[in-house]
Image: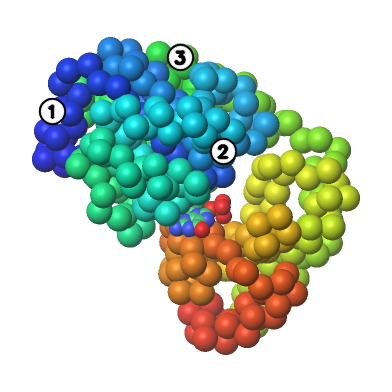
Amino acid sequence: MEKETLDRVQQLLATPQKVIIVGHKNPDGDAIGSCLGLSFFLSEMGHDCKVVMPNDFPEFLKWMPGNEAIHIFDKDTEQCEKLIEETDLIFTLDFNSLDRVGNLQPSLEASTAKFVMIDHHQAPADYATAMYSDVQMSSTAEMVYHFIASLQKLDLLSEPIATNLYTGIMTDTGSFRFPATSPTTHRVIAHLMEVGANGAAIHQNIYDTNTPDRLKLLGVALKNLTILTEYNTAYITMSQQELDDHNFKKGDTEGFVNYALSVLGIKFAVIFIENRQDAIVKISFRSKGAFSVNEFARSHYNGGGHTNAAGGRSDKSLEDTVTEFISILPLYKNALNAHA
Ligand code: 5GP
Ligand code: MN
């Protein structure tokens, strides 16, 4: 964290503040873990801290310490609007632009509070008084640890902070295997375990919670897997009907795209998930090596993210979305066949 950013944060936190911490729409383990971890820390420092999420989050995250106190904007809109109106300071975590917060966007844009950003996504927007952005970082949860370290407050780490940050780092690194996992990431994890994070229990809580329906849905996803050898690309489709047939719940398709990326030789993996209610197809992109799915998602799917993991959406039907995707690939043939 740069000295100037640190100075600004220290000024903003010099006296007890009313603080709201916000994560992105469809919050994942890193959004929830980083927000809850920071919330426990700032509360420990004497601030009045609340976490607000744009919409609900998956069941498999609903054991995380403090999760029951999260305010969900889409469920308790008026209360959340009031909280935001009355706050001095807003921390935005794990997203890079105010268009990533769904229905919360107008309230944040209308707020006169000061903003602090902590985030690791590419191309951060310029709305924060203090901006701690580092696209090399494994996760926002790891950044919250470094944030606490910069404030020289690591002595305040507690079991709930450690468990939340561990979970955020673990989920965003695919259990410490994605390339952004650094030696420092492992040192941070070691320290979090020393102050109370139980790695084995956290893995079980996140990964060993499959329902039979979800595993059967994975079976459908794997049946739908298509390989485009010419482009070192693999994709999966999930129709609304297939989701309905398996009693789909938020989070059930999390991680499916990684099976496409695990095929030998595949550099680019995509999952297209139909969402009839929102009349969109939600798309997740993953890559290995230099091929930037962030740029791909930005150029064609109104999305973004990281070099190797990004998301976006299409307003076309599922079928047309896939046809269009296949028609775009020749533009990237060289990039997808480069040795990197
Ligand atoms: P996922 O595919 O798991 O939804 O998202 C992968 C990464 O891309 C995450 O870091 C997520 O925050 C980001 N991401 C997902 N969807 C979008 C989107 O529509 N716009 C932007 N800018 N980023 C996205
Ligand atoms: Mn993240």
Please provide percent x and percent y for residue 140: 39, 40
Residue type beneath disc 2 = Asp
Q: Is mark 3 within 8 Å of ligand 2?
A: no
Q: Give 277 or 324, whichever is nearer the viewer.
A: 277
Along the horizontal axis of the image, is 277 left or right of 25? right
Circle 2 is placed at which residue position?
74
- Under tag 2, what secondary structure? loop
Residue type beneath disc 1 = Gln
Query: What is the quadrant of residue 206 in the picture?
Result: top right
Q: Tell which circle, 1 or 3, labels the residue nearer the N-terminal end.
A: 1
Q: Tell which circle, 2 or 1, labels the residue nearer the N-terminal end.
A: 1
Along the horizontal axis of the image, is 197 left or right of 48? right
Write the residue at 32% across / 27% down. Answer: 86
| Residue 169 in sight | no
Residue type beneath disc 3 = Glu
Along the horizontal axis of the image, is 188 left or right of 265? left
Q: Nearer the viewer, mark 3 or mark 2?
A: 2
Write the residue at 45% across / 14% down. Answer: 159
Residue 63, placed above or below residue 118: above
Spatial CA span between label 3 and label 2: 30 Å
